[in-house]
């Protein structure tokens, strides 16, 4: 079974803090993704990576950065957290084919106070 | 207009009823996915299809490429089917619908 794990299920941070969200997958997948999910807006792509050290902006990259130093690990970084970044964050991974399904992690519910 | 539209947004039904959730899309796709998200956040892939019909247990997914439309059906619905069902299409990336919140009452 593919397993995608995220470092925290719940996280509470203060405005201005630097926040790291970690995602690890164990299926040697090339592609990894970070989404945020908000009521009424559905899932929106923040960043994705198709190889180690490669990254591409998604639909809403502002205020976020990512790091992929190893194939199995994809980190999302909030350089200076703001209250409008309070959200559910979901990581996913997949193989390279467009027919590959994406496997999702359990999500991290981040609250920024 | 969203590239992927789902209907209805919310659906409440009684146990045993036949459920249909619809998904329409406006872009060229290589595949369409149906996902299930239970309270707590985890998302599970139910189906991925590029043509025709797939069945898994009480769940059936169909797609009509010409009409750019897909449906997810649940037969003999059960309270444990209560979840958010999300349609997503693969273009260069995955584009998601807003989800359908399904509640099945006993």
Image (cartoon, grey):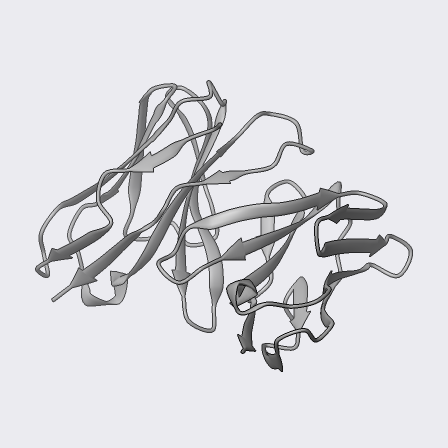
Residue shown at 26%/67% (left/top)? A84
Q: Is residue B64 left or right of residue B83?
A: right
Question: Looking at the image, can residue A51 be seen?
Answer: yes
Q: Is residue A72 left or right of residue B68?
A: left
Location of residue B27 with respect to B54 vertically, above or below: below
* Residue A10 sits in quarter: bottom left
* Residue A91 sits in quarter: top left
Residue shown at 60%/37% (left/top)? A101
Q: Is residue A76 left or right of residue A90?
A: left
Tell me the quadrant of the picture where the C terminus of chain A can be found. Answer: bottom left
Give x and y (percent) for residue B62: 81, 55
Residue shown at 35%/58% (left/top)? B40
* Residue B11 sits in quarter: bottom right
Question: Looking at the image, can residue B25 be seen?
Answer: no
Residue shown at 78%/49% (left/top)? B28
Q: Is residue A60 left or right of residue B1?
A: left
Give x and y (percent) for residue B54: 79, 46
Please tell me which residue lies in front, A25 or B38. Answer: B38
Q: Which residue is situated farthest in the right direction here?
A: B66
Please tell me which residue lies in front, A104 or A48. Answer: A104
Tag count in the figure? 0
Give x and y (percent) for residue A66: 31, 36
Give x and y (percent) for residue B84: 52, 65
Location of residue B85 with respect to A47 vertically, above or below: below
């Amino acid at each position: 079974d593919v397993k995608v794990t995220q470092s925290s299920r719940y996280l509470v941070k203060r405005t201005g803090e630097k926040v790291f969200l970690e995602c690890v997958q164990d299926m040697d997948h090339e592609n990894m993704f970070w989404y945020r999910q908000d009521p009424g807006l559905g899932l929106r792509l923040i960043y994705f990576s198709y190889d180690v050290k490669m990254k591409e902006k998604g639909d809403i990259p502002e205020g976020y950065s990512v790091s992929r130093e190893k194939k199995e690990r994809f980190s999302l970084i909030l350089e200076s957290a703001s209250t409008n970044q309070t959200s559910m964050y979901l990581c996913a991974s997949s193989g390279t084919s467009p027919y590959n399904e994406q496997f999702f992690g359990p999500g991290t519910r981040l609250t920024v106070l | 207009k969203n590239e992927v539209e789902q209907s209805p947004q919310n659906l409440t039904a009684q146990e045993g009823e036949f459920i249909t959730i619809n998904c329409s899309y406006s872009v060229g796709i290589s595949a369409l996915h149906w996902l299930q998200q239970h309270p707590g956040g985890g998302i599970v892939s139910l189906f991925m299809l590029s043509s025709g019909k797939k069945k898994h247990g009480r769940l059936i997914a169909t797609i009509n490429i010409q009409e750019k439309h897909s449906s997810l059906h649940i037969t003999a619905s059960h309270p444990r089917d209560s979840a958010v069902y999300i349609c997503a299409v693969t273009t260069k990336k995955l584009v998601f619908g807003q989800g359908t919140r399904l509640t099945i009452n006993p």
